[in-house]
Amino acid sequence: MAKIIVEVMLKPEILDPQGQAVGNALPRLGFTFATSVRQGKRFEIEMVGQPTDAQMADIHKAAETLLSNPVIETYLIKVEN
Amino acid sequence: MAKIIVEVMLKPEILDPQGQAVGNALPRLGFTFATSVRQGKRFEIEMVGQPTDAQMADIHKAAETLLSNPVIETYLIKVEN
Amino acid sequence: MALDTVSIAQETPDTAQPYKELGLKDDEYLRIKSILGRRPTSSELAMYSVMWSEHCSYKSSKVHLKQFGEKAPHSDALLVGIGENAGVVDVGQGYAVTFKIESHNHPSFIEPYQGAATGVGGIVRDILTMGARPIAVMDPLRFGLADAPDTHRVLPGVIAGIGGYGNCLGLPNIGGEIVFDETYAGNPLVNALCVGVMRHEDIKLAKAHGTGNLVVLFGAKTGGDGIGGVSVLASETFNAAKPTKRPSVQVGDPFAEKVLIECCLEIFHEDLVVGIQDLGGAGLSCATSELASAGSGGMNIQLEKVPLRDPSLSPEEILMSESQERMCAIVEPEKIKRFMAICKKWDVTATVIGEVTDGLQLNITFNGQLIVDVPPRTVAHEGPVYNRPIAEPEYRKSLQPISSAVPRPTSPEEIKSAILKLMSSPNLADKSWVTSQYDKYVQGNTVLAQPEDAGVIRLDEVTNLGVAISTDANARWSYLDPYEGAKLALAESCRNIAVAGAKPLAVTNCLNFGSPEDPGVMWQFAETVRGLADICLELGLPVTGGNVSFYNQTGSVAILPTPVIGVLGVIQDVRERTPMGISREGLELFILGKFDDNLSGSEWAHLFGEIGDSSPVLDLAQEKSLINFLLAGQSLFDAAHDLSNGGLAAAISEMVLRHGIGAKITVESAGIQLFVETPGRVIVAVNTANAEAVVELAQTHGVEISSLGSTGGDALCINDSVIPILELRAAFEETFPKLFG
Amino acid sequence: MKIGVVTFPGSLDDRDALRAIEMAGGQGVSLWHGSDNLKEVQAVILPGGFSYGDYLRCGAIARFAPIMSSIIIAAEHGFPVLGICNGFQVLAEAHLLPGALTRNHELHFLCKDQPLRIENNNTMWTSGFQMNQEVIIPLKNGEGSYQCDDATLNILESEGRVVARYLGQDPNGSRNLIAGITNERGNVVGLMPHPEHAVETLTGPSEDGLPFFTSILHQLVGR
Ligand SMILES: Nc1ncnc2c1ncn2[C@@H]1O[C@H](COP(=O)(O)OP(=O)(O)O)[C@@H](O)[C@H]1O
Ligand SMILES: [Mg+2]
């Protein structure tokens, strides 16, 4: 059984109000470690067995069309076991 | 300069309507690879230099109080360079 | 893993059971044994423990609540009374309206967003269950002090949760309340009201009739939500090694509920159900036992058929799960195909899990083994009843009158700074930061919404028939005198309805109190119910339902007694409604009703840390005359606004701020008259041409009327004090963004 | 004159849009997301709401509905489509309009009576407005912040494809205060504010939304 991770982040040039809000909240709570915060999404997709090449192609297509919007976002796919 | 990644996921026993919506949409689009989908958050936090022990402790505290709600979520911290 | 079946229970009568951990008392456990003639199985124990909890059985409040039935006024409007999921009233033209308030207080403290969201989801399902389309929601809320750190955790989450769920369902939010008081720290009150409409013939009841009819569970799959408590049972009794990580919070899925609403309405439209019940607190335990108990009695359920989100759930947990967005319907076999087709259309999971029998028992099997064999009435309707000790609380003996430390401003500067102070205080400041997070336009029938006195919704686009709803509570008066406090809250709610131009018709309530095991709290509760029942009888308004929330306390400190009252009114032509804001220059302002000098419980005194010693006493005759006057004069008013929290000072400020048109008023004793909250008063703005008629009308109704001033300009002028609207608005509007933005 | 309104699971303002069409003198036809049949309507409105709960991204799942495949093909051939709020989000996800709608900068759902300026009255849906007419129309959404890259923004501005712009205080952080845009042909318009909630003063802040519905009817007659 494999687990596919798809990480979706806003492109750097796109305003990220959520990340910004976290970035502003941290110092108010006394946390001073961060210089910048961006917030994105993380999908954990379970599948039976290891992904075949055809399935990997499908996963890329799903990440590109459904899980992310290429106009504003980028994605990264990882396979875990 | 280090990058701290905080991954926040709903606990497995907690209903995840977002993941469910994706899981239901995939087969409608002809993607049949997934047996289950969960959706969580991913924070990318940039900081100057490598985190000290005290800073790591702070990062854990921030992850536990601000970035996640331990009643329904779990978090995982990773350090990238 | 061993399944505890009825036959095992018979064979092992002495097995120890964790009934105490499940909240049952020794005598309650004995009673279960005597009902069954044996020890309960673990599944039966689970059902009884949750159904006999305070929350589901009303065991401490029942003896008091029955006054609502005993003292009930005769009302032709009441179509369905207390006892069903929500009461239903006839509003004419063949329309029936159902409305109810429920609390989701504690869950909203634990997880503000989800707690509040699922609170909205729950009350909406109650309304839907009656056969109605939900058409609006309201949210009376109470929080700890506005500047307390925990309030900053709780309030934004609660607001986002109410908005997140209600907006996604497409329900306009048309009003509510936000009040801050120290006693709510740790015990926020999240009450939610929903109102729905249907045709008379579409009313549905939670009854399982007809041998052979099918029991259908539909909506979301069942997970481990809200069963933190029962995991005790699953783990201790059977398998100590099993992970008992069962969440006590529920997560809402508003999209699933929206789809469920549309699916149900289509099912109702085709008349496909015999009875229907939503799944809320106590989940399937509650739904099956209530349906069977209210029906002919017999029901078989095959529990393994319940679709699960988490396959590791034990039968006890399936019975107790409080997973949201589920419904249970009784369907005739010949209609099941069509029922399933509609569910499929909406992508709603539906499963036949059992059938109605001609027996008297509720029998539940799990993979063929009998695990529950109970008379359903003993679970659902014949739970324990307590006559808890009652004692007038000590604090009432040490109440002090309002001291001279509470200022009575008189000079122009004093008046100006007092008004600015009052209007910027969190309890009176502009709530747009909150209400702008709620959709008030969806469905296109919202005629009045916050910040108006009442929400008004159009029911019929052709005839313009509509309903008005208001929720009110004055917990400080209830603290001073719970009997009068309850009456005053109801009177205020009626006044809010009448001010908008609607005729009060029916009442719902949500009674939020501390621990019923504290005799002082129980006294507050008993006095509240007595007051409510009395005034409802006197005004001829039926109580159609409600909710009781006990145990809102931290240690020995209870919240202020907070009976939240909701009143529903009917307005024949919504185009005639009266708004609260001054919309034109040159209008004459009148004030109706008398005032006294008792500042007890007022917001002004509260700002200086005082509560005083005596609540006002409701003058019922005056209140009735005022309501009649308002209804008779409806067409004569340009604007009308009720005086409540903050008295005349707040009322006139709000009227001015609504559209930014000023006013000039004169008062004799500003120090008292501006701030006293004497009930039974209203300000009306009247076109000069109508002024004489209004005065005459007041006199014929025996309502005291006096001229207050006139509208116009860009300032609120009180005697010689000039408060520019810009300045007043800044004070009024900056508080919430500063606190929570 | 038949105008379709699509109901997706989670659509909320579909009935309001149908009512607005009827008030403008048209015939509203309800279209179901699961069918690709446009029922011979002459224009389509994608209404507001939370299609599929808007859980992934607003409009991201709805754009794959069967009805959308018909609408996308038709729109590319000049068929008039108006996307209101969630409908605008669906159109952006379907790439019938450029850019994307993202989380409001204050991170809250925001419901308010929003002043706007109509800056293009050359579309099928706005021809009934005066150029630069100022109107008040309810805005209500959590993800209404219009974002696109600089090149796209330049094109939109230089070609006059900004249909409506927010006036006064910035409600959500949209680039250049954009409230609505059109495609090159002017047949597809996306709008964050809700004109269907501004068709009678009894239930809305104004009647300023009505021209969106009368415009299309006039355009269709003229064809
Ligand atoms: N304070 C109250 N006043 C009037 N009726 C009440 C009150 N509290 C509860 N009830 C009624 O008791 C019945 C049971 O309440 P409850 O178990 O909360 O219903 P539900 O499970 O449908 O929410 C309902 O009819 C409800 O309206
Ligand atoms: Mg119920």
Image (cartoon, coloured by chain):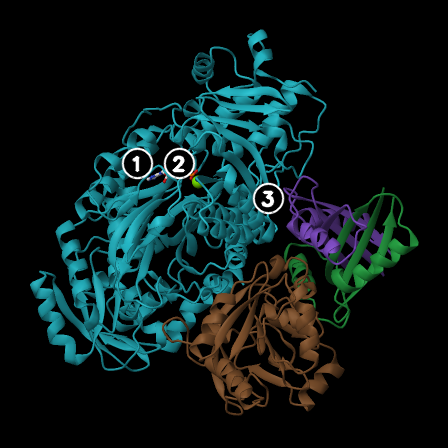
Chain colours: A green, B purple, C cyan, D brown
Mark toward the viewer: 3 or 2: 3
Q: Which residue is mark 2?
A: C514
Given the image, on which type of amino acid does mark 2 rest? Gly
Residue A55 in which image quadrant: bottom right
Q: Position of residue A67 (x, y in %)?
A: 75, 60
Mark carried by residue C524: 1
Inspect the image, locate mark 1, and give the three-letter code of the amino acid beneath it. Answer: Gln
Identify whether C649 is placed above or below C311. below
> From this viewpoint, is residue A63 visible?
yes
Quarter of the view holding residue C353: top right
Is tag 2's residue or tag 1's residue first in the polypeptide sequence?
2
Left or right of C552 on screen, residue C491: left
**Ligand 1 in which quarter:** top left
C700 shown above or below C568: below
- From mark 3 to mark 2, how far is it between C-alphas? 34 Å
Labels 3 and 2: the sequence-earlier one = 3
Q: What's the residue type where badge 3 is placed?
A: Ala
Discs 3/1, front: 3
Q: Are marks 3 and 2 in contact (CB under 8 Å)?
A: no
| Residue sitting nearer the eye, C182 or C308 | C308
Which residue is the extreme one toward the bottom? D131
| Chain letter for mark 2 | C
Q: Which chain is disc 1 placed on? A: C
As drawn, C489 above or below C726: above
Q: Are marks 2 and 1 in contact (CB under 8 Å)?
A: yes
User: What residue is rendered at 52% in x and 70% in y?
Assistant: D29
- Residue assigned mark 3: C220
Distance from the alpha carbon under mark 2 to that under mark 1: 9 Å
B32 or C508, which is in the foreground?
B32
- Element at badge 3? loop
